[in-house]
Image (tube, grey):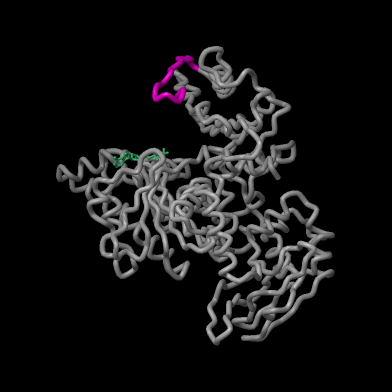
Amino acid sequence: MSEVLQLLSDVPPLRDLSTAELENLIRSSDVRIASPEGVVVRKGRSWPRIGIVLAGELEVVATDDGDSRSRVSLLEPGDMFGQPPSGKQSASEVEVLAVTESVYLMIPWYTWEEMIGSRDGSSEALASVCVTLDAPDRTRGRAQARAAAGADRYGLGLSSSRPAKILVINCGSSSLKYNFYDTHDRSNDREGIVERIGIEGGRLVHRPGDGTKVIRELGRINHDVAFEAVVEVLTDSEMGVIRDLSDITGVGHRVVHGGSKYSDPVVIDDDVVSEIERLCSLAPLHNPHNLAAIRKSMALMPQVPQVAVFDTGFHQRMPAHAYMYALPYSFYEQQGIRRYGFHGISHNYLALRAASCLERDVADLRIITCHLGNGSSVSAVDRGRSVDTSMGLTPLEGLVMGTRSGDIDPGAMLHMARTNDMGFEELDSLLNRKSGVLGLSGISNDFREIEDGARQGNRLALLALHVFCHRLRKYIGAYIAVMGGLDVMVFSAGIGERSPWVRSLTCQGLSELGIELEDRVNRYGYAGGDEVIDLSSKKSRVKVLAMQTDEGRMIARETIRALDR
Ligand code: ADP
């Protein structure tokens, strides 16, 4: 029973239910067993229920009038299927069959409505994870209709029916980045950064939107003063874009760690603040700064809604087999030791933007998104859902980075602790600040310098470049296996957008896997600004794209959606 409860508590629309409520839900629903090939939902019948797979595997199959049948999706434990409650019972357009002996929970509509439907965000959570019983061509029809309605099918252009002025805050240990978006007058969009917080020489660099920069020297400042400097520049009588803070519709805050609790953005109240505070233990270098900005923002703008957008949120729908470490289970249960993944705001943006550009529905695509900057990570995005990602409990796992090692045998740490007598602090500093391409090359953490070194024949710089690309290739191969194929691959962030060398080394020899670059475009095409470059050759089965990521815009989009809800 406790395993079933654990599984259900990981299903997004049920996350906020207490154990007693989950037990009640199970009692009010039916638990069914299906033998292999047994029919769970018959085509043509209405099925006014929500199903949740508890064990085994089910498949959703589309059939036509002849004998042809094709699998639309495979459902594993924790996956939901059925018809979201709408008051109108329509006939199922697909069949759901058991692949192996399977157990599933069948929740009648009225039980769902009574226990879950009235909770905030439950219908969005259901819509985002529930596999519906519509025929795939109807889904495609909807996608085409959306495409016809405009290229901005995922709202990344921030078109909102109501005018909105959104301030986005991304507060780190020594910097505070901000973006301001006016959805009804794009000429008012602004961005900037306060740098060197907490040390001498703090300064604000503001971009008024005409290609120029305004710099204000601030001296030695803390995060509160940095926030006030942002407010000053936005309300400045000459270059400001708002009269006062009451003009702002909402503030979106990037919060690094949302733990297992937050997959979606939330409007911040006292409970959310406490929860983010509790999660500081999982992200001690980030959440406290995010929280400082939230508190300051709430104090300055008590009437303006504040929204937290979590960098771990997008990866919260990863299946358990992707996020569990093979440690004793109690470490997960008692301390939350599991893989969370990061850069989720960016991976989500890249997948949606890629689908948008290709005029495809993200729900039809298997995408690998490579965010390659100072910190790097790669994600497998299967039909809009992150099903695996390279970072783990912390941003240290996965790819080789500027100064972080990425994957390493944990036994190597034990060995070094034992034989070199290295303590926790030393190992922490070694892995996070002295490793990666900096450690390997001994030159720099800046990839441009690594490439320059390699070009000039520096053996270790070349080695660092090769180790970086080899690691990325391994992940790409693994994620193709995870998703059973690949339709689109996206390169982004400083290195991904601008390094033809990294892209070609990474993709070399992958034509068997459907990946082939057009050498000329890869070399000379530049993904700057709003542009998306298609790097793939005509023969390439997989579309390979390069583009800028835009976390600020994604946070603004999520903030608008959270407020609309
Ligand atoms: P952050 O993760 O801090 O947001 P960025 O996305 O800006 O970082 O990426 C920074 C990285 O991109 C640095 O390693 C930088 O050297 C690298 N980079 C920037 N331009 C180029 C280029 N033209 N060629 C190769 N690497 C580049």
Residue 563, above or below 408: above
Depth check, front residue: 193 or 392: 193
The stretch drawn in magenta includes residue 324: no
Q: Residue 413, can we see it?
A: no
Q: Is residue 339 left or right of residue 487?
A: right
Depth check, front residue: 65 or 496: 65
Residue 557, above or below 206: below
- At horizontal 64% and vertical 19% (from top left) the residue drawn is 244
- At horizontal 67% and vertical 83% (from top left) the residue drawn is 39
Quarter of the image where one finds residue 385: bottom right
The stretch drawn in magenta includes residue 218: yes
Quarter of the image where one finds residue 332: bottom right
Give the percent coordinates (x, y) of residue 81. 67, 69
Depth check, front residue: 262 or 265: 265
Q: Residue 205, can we see it?
A: yes
Of all residues, the one furthest to the top in this rendering is 237
Task: Classify the position of the N terminus by image quarter.
Answer: bottom right
Give the percent coordinates (x, y) of residue 166. 60, 32
Quarter of the image where one finds residue 325: bottom right
Quadrant in which ligand 1 is drawn: top left
Residue 319, above or below 347: below
Give the percent coordinates (x, y) of residue 403. 37, 42
Of all residues, the one furthest to the front in this rendering is 148
Give the percent coordinates (x, y) of residue 515. 33, 63
Residue 94, above or below 476: below
Q: What range is drawn magenta here?
A: 207-220
Task: Classify the position of the C terminus by image quarter.
Answer: top right
